[in-house]
Amino acid sequence: QVQLVESGGGSVQAGGSLRLSCAAVGSGFSNMNIGWYRQALGKQREQVALIKPYSVTNYADSVKGRFTISRDNAKNTAYLQMNSLKPEDTAVYYCYARRLGQPNEYWGRGTQVTVSS
């Protein structure tokens, strides 16, 4: 079992930055795919960024060049650095984890990010 706890959300003006953290409690963090998803009001949840165990990363087109996902396996923590934020980035951001080769998925409770124009 893995528990994920997000932090770092808040309210910023357009053009500002936030850094989200996802702390994992449990074993095997270094062998997990870690992702950040977001869900805006009235919209479906979408993947924002993903980082694999060897730090291979993927990003949604809408955030490329602005967001950076990273991980610190020694701290069992993943991060999402968000720069040049736009109002359309407003959403609840969720951390996701899945061990390689296993079907179980883990989700955090989410952290709200609000970007005002």
Image (cartoon, rainbow, N blue to C red):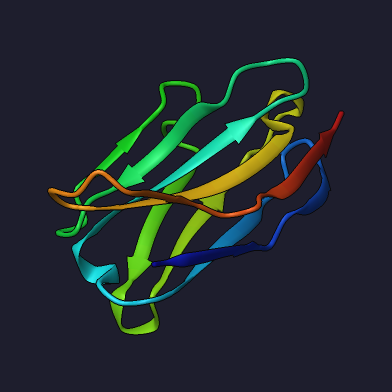
Q: Left or right? Give the position of 52 relative to 38.
A: left
- Residue farthest bottom in this picture: 74
Residue occupying the point 64% across, 29% down: 39
Rendering quarter of residue 13: top right
Residue 48 appears at what percent x and percent y? 47, 34
How many numbered markers are drawn? Answer: 0
Q: Left or right? Give the position of 8 relative to 38.
A: right
Residue occupying the point 22% across, 51% down: 52
Residue 40 appears at what percent x and percent y? 71, 25
Rendering quarter of residue 70: bottom left
Q: Is residue 40 above or below residue 67?
A: above
Residue 34 at least partly seen:
yes
Q: Is residue 79 above or below residue 109?
A: below
Residue occupying the point 19% across, 49% down: 102
Residue 92 appears at what percent x and percent y? 70, 39
Q: Quadrant of the C terminus?
A: top right
Residue occupying the point 38% across, 76% down: 26
Looking at the picture, tell me which residue is in the foreground, 71 or 12. 71
Residue 24 appears at what percent x and percent y? 45, 71
Looking at the picture, tell me which residue is in the foreground, 37 or 12. 37
Looking at the picture, tell me which residue is in the foreground, 23 or 98. 98
Q: Left or right? Give the position of 73 relative to 8.
A: left
Residue 63 at least partly seen:
no
Q: Quadrant of the N terminus?
A: bottom left
